[in-house]
Amino acid sequence: MKYKSTRNPQIKITSAQAIAQGLSHEGGLFVPEELPKMGENDILNLCEKSYAERAFEIFRLFLEDFSDEEIRYCVENAYGGNFDTENIAEISHLLKGTYILELWHGPTCAFKDMALQILPYLLTVSAKKTIPDKKTAILVATSGDTGKAALEGFKNVEGTTISVFYPEEGVSDMQKRQMQTQEGDNVFVCAVKGNFDDCQNGVKAIFTDKNFASELEKNGIVLSSANSINWGRLCPQIVYYISAYAELIKNEEIRYGEKINIVVPTGNFGNILAAYYAKEMGLPINKLICASNANNILTDFINTGVYDRNREFYTTISPSMDILISSNLERLLYHLSGENTDLVNKWFSSLKENGRYEVTPEVKEKISGLFYAGCCNDKETKAAIKDCFGSYSYLMDTHTAVAYKVYGDYKKSTGDNTKTVIASTANPYKFGAAVFEALGGINSGEGTDEFDIIEKLEAMTKTVIPEPLAATKNKAVRFRDVIEREKMPETVMNFLTK
Ligand SMILES: *Cc1c(COP(=O)(O)O)cnc(C)c1O
């Protein structure tokens, strides 16, 4: 199976090239030429398998240029002891027929681990096939979760280095602490004076600097990205939806063929796009429910067909969804427009020039058939955390709470009682201060730090702080540098050629 670009019909490359390269040169995203199908037997065959074995079966369909041995090497290294549960992704129950798919049992306690634990292996195998004898240097600008998950994924992976830049004032205390205490011999972390956009622009400037690239070339190094538009991040996300369905059959919650809804708290549209791919592969899915916070650009888009980023940006208590450009939407629009690269080019140049585009009535109708969209502000998010804990003694993080609230609205407005899986994207302790407040805790006061708050939350809810977060308290800070944005190229070069 080959991969094509959403913006240029001439491009056709292997999966290894798509993963090693990340983004197509003209700016398009790589998509599979044809989606593999999974029927009843394929799904039933997964029921008795482990998560890594399920991942193996699904990756084989997408990575035809990888040998079985290579795929096995990737899945076995990624989905083992790095997670705090043998099932890798756990399913919890609220009401009968409402399930929470916990995607945060990995080393950084957010769902980004599901893809970033395996990406380094997919990337090094891909690089070996396409650019042998080169070292890969990963550069990441992060607003929190991605940076830490990428650091944990790439630490000590042979043939790679990873450099992460985060905004000095733009991440939570816990996120900063997680990154500053990062272990590994091939890692570099640095704060930048400025906001997330400054970091992002700084990294982009390095990627497009030809002199920088040729200087690295002399040292046998190529730059790459662990960004969520890489196919190597999307493919692992398809796995957990299919795996969850097989698990529900195994647990006799559903029979094969019974349709389920999937609810996803959405930012960059990667996670929900993976659910769409699972549905197109034949997984019996009814509605895809797209949940946004106050940055509800996707709610408006799905309901009107107009994508308009000319709006206020809100900083919310679900910061990983504070996004006004949902990059992965481009892949959906490519498929729904009948792979019409002309239309995709037109829409995305309009987005670049005017901050806005409107899809055709045909595409809008297809979107309405597949998706339901809703949104939720901070106040409603906190109320959802309280309600869920009160009703089911289940503690959710702020992102999952957005999905919970929107799902409640969906049920009310449609009366649909289809069994439903809510994707849970972070452990509640990762956003402990907001969760504690939602339950009525008061966390201001002299000398209160992140650890005081999560310890109070632990006592209040009789739940347990996950080990990787607790461990950061006593870990040595390794990275204290704060630099001006202009110093980023020089700083990266020093690290890479030292
Ligand atoms: C990244 C992230 C999201 C958003 O996922 P997308 O794939 O960007 O839609 C939601 N919740 C958490 C906790 C995240 O880290």
Image (spheres, helix red, strand yellow):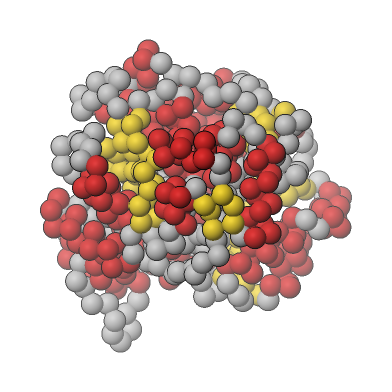
User: Residue farthest to the top?
Assistant: 41
Q: Is residue 88 visible?
A: no
Say above or below: 409 vs 438.
above
Residue appearing at x 29%, y 73% in the figure = 452
Residue 275 horizontal/vertical position (percent): 43, 36
Position of residue 156 measured from the top left corner of the image (x, y, whole percent):
59, 47
Which sits in the foreground, 53 or 287?
287
Report the number of numbered marks. Answer: 0
Of residues 345 and 125, the one drawn nearer to the viewer in this rendering: 345
> Is 432 left, or right, of 491 in this rendering?
left
Whole-percent x, y for residue 144 in the image: 49, 61
Tell which of 413 and 439 is nearer to you: 413
In the depicted structure, whether residue 140 falls above or below residue 56: below
- Which quarter of the picture shows residue 352? bottom right
Q: Does residue 322 appear in this view? A: yes
| Apparent side of residue 297 relative to residue 483 in the rendered image (left or right) | left
Q: Residue at x 47, y 57 (%)?
A: 297
Q: Is residue 309 above or below residue 56?
A: below
